[in-house]
Image: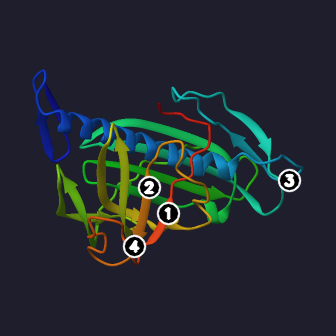
């Protein structure tokens, strides 16, 4: 059986290469955890009490990506109307594309992404200040290299260079253990996903540990990473990918 993913094709027959098969399962779990993480950020910031203020369109999709568009009133005058898009890829293949509309604060409207080389998840959100101004969905994010580089993993080799894209200005390392086998992913990410405000809960729902650092190839350590800002991914019970 052949499984293709980004930079490597893994092949195995019945009873052969159990480590690579387990590693692929771990990769899928990490990618799903990243997707849940993005939705945690979007929904955690946007699911807020309503009050008399600016009116915006609201559309929060279910796990199949569909929703019924309604209108809502923002909690205060500090909020704006927002539209967001969350898109995930494995290799060059798009595996999901979700759009949101809701009230949000201006600081919560940004472009960012996780990029492990073999997989990438992007978020693109924008804000406007008029009543019901978020009529159009957020556009797709077209990213180009920004000159920064981090290590990424190809199989068990985690010393491969990866060109960061768009607003990816931090290097990242994610670790998960499945069936006693520990899998490490490395790559690039945006600073919004390395802040203490954005990620304040533990990773007990997935067992995925995430750490960030700044500087080209700063995610080089193979064991516990000293000197990095150690973070754990916050995952709330609202899971769109399972």
Measured as percent of width and height from the top left, residue 217 is found at 26, 73
* Residue 205 visible at all: yes
Instruction: State which tag comes first along the sequence, 3 or 2.
Output: 3
Q: Which residue is mark 2?
A: 209
> Residue 185, percent across and down?
30, 54
Q: Which mark is residue 213?
A: 4
Viewer-nearest of discs 4 and 3: 4
The residues tagged by marks 3 and 2 sit, at their Cα atoms, a distance apart of 39 Å
Badge 4: residue crowd in 10 Å (few <14, some 14–19, many ≥20): many
Residue 32, quarter of the rendered image: top left
Which residue is pictured at 10% across the width and 28% down the height? 16
Residue under the point 20% across and 45% down: 6
Name the mark on residue 53.
3
- Residue at the spot of label 1: 231
Considering only order in the chain, which callout, 3 or 4, is on the residue closer to the N terminus?
3
In front: label 1 or label 3: 1
| Residue name at image x 37 percent, y 48 percent | 176
Residue 134 visible here? no
Asked whether, in this view, residue 96 is left or right of residue 71, the answer is: left
């Amino acid at each position: 059986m052949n499984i293709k993913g980004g930079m490597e094709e893994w092949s195995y027959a019945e009873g052969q290469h159990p480590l690579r098969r387990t590693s692929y399962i771990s990769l899928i779990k990490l990618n799903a955890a990243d997707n849940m993480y993005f939705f945690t950020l979007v929904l955690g910031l946007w699911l807020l009490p309503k009050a008399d203020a600016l009116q915006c369109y609201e559309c929060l999709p279910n796990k199949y990506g569909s929703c019924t568009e309604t209108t809502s009133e923002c909690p205060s005058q500090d909020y704006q109307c927002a539209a967001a898009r969350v898109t995930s890829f494995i290799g060059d293949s798009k595996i999901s594309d979700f759009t949101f509309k809701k009230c949000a604060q201006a600081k919560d409207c940004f472009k960012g992404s996780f990029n492990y080389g073999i997989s990438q998840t992007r978020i693109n959100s924008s804000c406007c200040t008029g009543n019901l101004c978020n009529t159009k969905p957020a556009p797709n994010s077209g990213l180009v290299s920004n000159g920064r580089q981090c290590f990424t993993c190809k199989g068990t080799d985690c010393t491969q260079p990866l060109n960061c894209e768009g607003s990816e200005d931090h290097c990242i390392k994610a670790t998960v253990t499945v069936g006693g086998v520990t899998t490490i992913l490395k790559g690039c990410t945006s600073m919004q996903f390395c802040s203490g405000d954005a990620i304040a809960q533990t990773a007990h729902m997935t067992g995925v540990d995430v750490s960030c650092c700044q500087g080209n190839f700063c995610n080089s350590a193979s064991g516990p990473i000293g000197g990095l800002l150690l973070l754990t991914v916050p995952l709330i019970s609202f899971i769109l990918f399972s």
